[in-house]
Amino acid sequence: MAIKSTIFRALLGVSDLDRGYYAEHNLTLARHPSETDERMMVRILAFALNADERLQFGRGISTDDEPALWLKDDTGRILKWIEVGLPDERLLRRAAGRADEVILLTYGGRTVDIWWQKESATLSKLNNLTVLSLAVEDSRALAALAERNMTLTCTVQDGQIWFSAGDITLGITLRQIFPA
């Protein structure tokens, strides 16, 4: 019998002063058995940074034809395709053909730089791709916040990101890899 996904719930308050976006989102996340707390929390961070009332989580890590998150308009056109981790370049090329904008939020420290060296020749040709890297210390600190029921806040101001759970506040740093 297959192991089922674990359900996590998060009340996420977003105050994005840079975009003028302020809202609370009740999120339900199905964490696949092979997904780590780190990846799940990076998905939540990606949601917070791109928050919109129409932003949705994809079906998950086991589905190749859907992203971690996506934003569609009322006609079903994909406005944003958001991935996390270090996906295969074919997936990103396919996404770039289907979506107006593709955002990749990578994490994993040195492995990100090795992955980018390998994939940059192909991926740098995609003019609708943005690649961001989360510092390994930040992704691990996010993972430590994971609980089955979470109350989280994310504040973005002047490019600075603060992510909080209870009395713990993390200053998150993103490095833009592409476009440089």
Image (cartoon, rainbow, N blue to C red):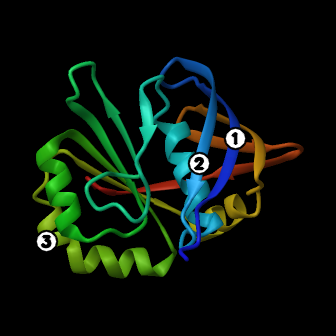
Please state the horizontal and vertical placement of residue 143, each as a whole percent of the image.
69, 63
- Residues under labels 1 and 2: Cα distance? 8 Å
* Rendered image quadrant of residue 23: top right
Q: Nearer the viewer, residue 100 or 137?
A: 100
Q: Is residue 65 above or below residue 56?
A: below
Few, some or many residues within 10 Å of mark 2 (<14, 14–19, 20+): many
In contact (CB < 8 Å): disc 1 and disc 2: yes
Q: Amino acid at mark 2?
A: Leu
Q: Nearer the viewer, residue 44 or 116?
A: 44
Q: Pointer 3: what residue?
A: 121
Q: Pointer 1: what residue?
A: 10
Q: Is residue 3 above or below residue 154?
A: below
Q: Earlier in the sequence, mark 3 or mark 2?
A: 2
Q: Pointer 2: what residue?
A: 29
Quarter of the image with the C terminus is bottom left
Q: Earlier in the sequence, mark 1 or mark 2?
A: 1
- Residues under labels 3 and 2: Cα distance? 34 Å
Q: Residue at x 61, y 41 (%)?
A: 28
Q: Amino acid at mark 1?
A: Ala
Q: Is residue 149 left or right of residue 136?
A: right
Q: Amino acid at mark 3?
A: Ala
For mark 2, give the secondary structure.
Answer: strand
Q: Is residue 145 left or right of residue 68?
A: right
Quarter of the image with the N terminus is bottom right
Q: Earlier in the sequence, mark 3 or mark 1?
A: 1
